[in-house]
Image (cartoon, helix red, strand yellow):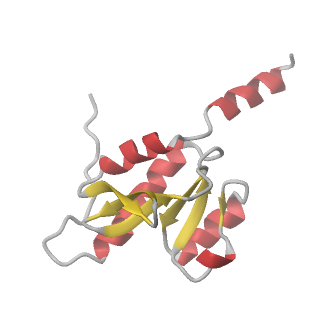
Amino acid sequence: MTKGTVARRKRTARQGVPFASVCALATALPGVEEAMSWGTPGLKLKGRFLARLKEDGDSLVLRIGFETRDRLMKASPEVFYITDHYAGYPSVLVRLSAVRKSALQKLLREAWSEVAAELPLGEPRRPRRASRK
C-alpha cells in the first residue's frame, strides 16, 4: 500500500455523517427540536423548518440561502446538489455519506442563524458556543 492510498483511506474514513449525528449537532443549538417534516425525520427551530432527511436516506435537505447554496454546489458538487424541485427554495441537498462533520456543523449553525433571523423578537438569535472542557 502506498502512502497516498493510506492518506486517501483516512480521508474517506472521516467523511460521512449519520442522521443521528446530524440531530445531535443541530439539537445542541438553542431551540432546535426533532420533528417530522414531509413524512421524514426532521429538525425545526421554534416550529420553523431547518432540515430533514430526504426520502433516499442519504441526503439532508438543509435550509440555506441561495448564494451559499450556489457557492457550495460549485465548490463541492459531489457533496452538495439540488433537484429541480428545490431550485426555487432556499435549500441545498447534502449527501450525508460524503460530507465532513465539521463542514456540516458549520452549515447547521449558518442555517440556524438564517431561520432565527426570521423569528419574532424575543426569540434566540445566536447559537451558544459549546463550552470547552
The residue lying at 37 percent from left, 58 percent from top is 43
The residue lying at 46 percent from left, 59 percent from top is 52
> What quarter of the picture does the N terminus occupy?
top right
User: Does residue 23 appear left or right of residue 78 in this picture?
Assistant: left
Give the quadrant of residue 124.
Answer: bottom left
User: Does residue 98 appear left or right of residue 67 in this picture?
Assistant: right
Image position of 84 with respect to 9: above or below: below
Give the quadrant of residue 87.
Answer: bottom right
In the picture as drawn, the residue positioned furthest to the top comes out as 1
> What quarter of the picture does the C terminus occupy?
top left
Q: How many marks?
A: 0
The residue lying at 28 percent from left, 41 percent from top is 130
| Residue 108 image offset from top left, x and y in percent | 43, 56
Image position of 62 with respect to 17: above or below: below
In the picture as drawn, the residue positioned furthest to the right comes out as 2
The residue lying at 38 percent from left, 70 percent from top is 114
| Residue 122 image offset from top left, x and y in percent | 13, 72
| Residue 23 image offset from top left, x and y in percent | 39, 47
Give the quadrant of residue 82.
Answer: bottom right
In the picture as drawn, the residue positioned furthest to the front comes out as 39
| Residue 30 image offset from top left, x and y in percent | 24, 55
In the picture as drawn, the residue positioned furthest to the left comes out as 122
Image position of 12 with respect to 73: above or below: above
Q: Nearer the viewer, residue 131 or 59?
A: 59
Q: Nearer the viewer, residue 63 or 65?
A: 63
